[in-house]
Amino acid sequence: MPHPTDSSRRNFLKQGVLASSVLWNLPTVSAQTASSSDKLRLAFVGIGNRGTSNIKLFAATERTEFVAAADVHLDGEHCTEARTLLGDIPLYNDFREMLEREGDKFDAVAISTPDFAHFPVAMACMAAGKHVYLEKPLAHTFQEVEMLMEQAERTGVVTQMGNQGHSGANFHQFKAWSEAGIIKNITHIDAYMNSPRRWHGWDVPGFDTGHATPTGLDWDLWQVGRPWHDYSPRLHPQNWRSWFSYGSGAFGDWAPHILDTAHRFLDLGLPGTISAERRDGPNDFIFPQASTIKFSFPARIAHPACDVTWYDGVENLPPLPAEEASDVKRQRNGKYLYSSDMVFKGGTHSDTLRILPAAKMRKLAPTLPRVSGRNPDHYMNFVQACHGEAEPQSPFSISGPLTQVFILGIIAQRLGGTLKFDRATKRFPDHPLANDLLGGPPPRAGWEPVYAS
């Protein structure tokens, strides 16, 4: 089915079906277990780039039926493969129109939009009673994450953030080693992402202007409720990741895959202090060329106080532990975890931990818990959860606080210095500007209801 023309979409809007006063105030629909069919009836919002990968990975479960999809730029080259994969299903520019017209035909939605659009799409889908698979990071602001967690609890839908390694070998190993007392008393973690990023080398004084909007791109809808900026190829497709106003930098891209298990099984919660120890090329609009951000977490019931230091930037590497071989080939992303008597080395996604030095790992190997590799992947886990067969591995209640840690780090990247954070009130007690950044800019006209608390 071809996607609706601009004129047909305007007519649909004129009918009032998509008016924000109607859409955002629809009665919340209670969550339902997926249909009795073995296949999960699934819709997609955002089908290019990461969305294309998610289409393939959900198809690989062989337990999904694709019902509908929406993307603000269906004519874009980055959506070509996805449209072929999806076949002859209804396609829409506007996710709200898809929900209104096709919502009774699907049980769940996979959302792969840019970071800043995660929140309004997910809120609308949960209000409609749809289970939600939402790419990482969960949202763009601290307050948006709060509201997503509240909406998930209120509606009872199944939720899953797309940090895929959280259903992989690293998850099961970290859990087993923690329960066995192998991983304990962690007091410091170094986490790093040293691959080149798309904004490296940029020095921008503001947003670009003067570019023609590509054919078929609904630029107004692409920006959802955010302040208007003219189209620029430095925003779409994918370059939005570079900007504080739209993306989440290296934190949003990689920290959910590197620090997820440590955050969960060490019960880190939210930090008490965030310090920007290094910011190369600070800029009011884009992420630093390199940064070192230190998070200080207080002692928890079963764990001592712990500092987590994040390094990004091509040459901004963490120090090697004494237990690491001096000639080791450095990975571009990973982590070191330090306790009083152990040092653990890990990578990203599903990579398992190793004990340093290697001789110690070999000596302890016979006593280490065995972890089976026969576990459902992240996509199958979500499908099973929607059918009531399993619990989701990364629901919003777990992935939400994880995401909030990174958002606090991004605020430190923007402002510099040391920020004290009250874990109880979830506010900065002495920094009004930092508190303003917890909630982000006010929404544009027509989008206010979805951003209201």
Image: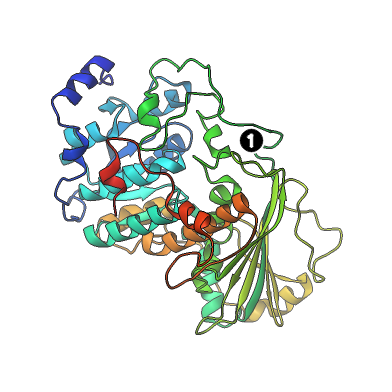
Reading the image, the residue beneath label 1 is 198
Residue 366 x %, y %: 65, 79
Q: Is residue 452 above or below residue 284?
A: below
Is 385 or 258 nearer to us in this picture? Answer: 258
Q: Is residue 264 above or below residue 313?
A: below
Is 363 or 332 nearer to us in this picture? Answer: 332
- Count residues near mark 1 (Cα–Cα under 10 Å), then give few for <14, some for 14-19, many for 20+: some
Which residue is outermost to the right?
327
The residue located at (42%, 35%) in the rendering is 227
Occupied quadrant, residue 398: bottom left
Q: Is residue 114 visible?
A: yes
Q: Is residue 4 left or right of residue 378?
A: left
Is 379 or 433 nearer to us in this picture? Answer: 433
Residue 212 x %, y %: 48, 15
The residue located at (22%, 49%) in the rendering is 127
State which quarter of the image contains the C terminus. bottom left
State which quarter of the image contains the N terminus. top left
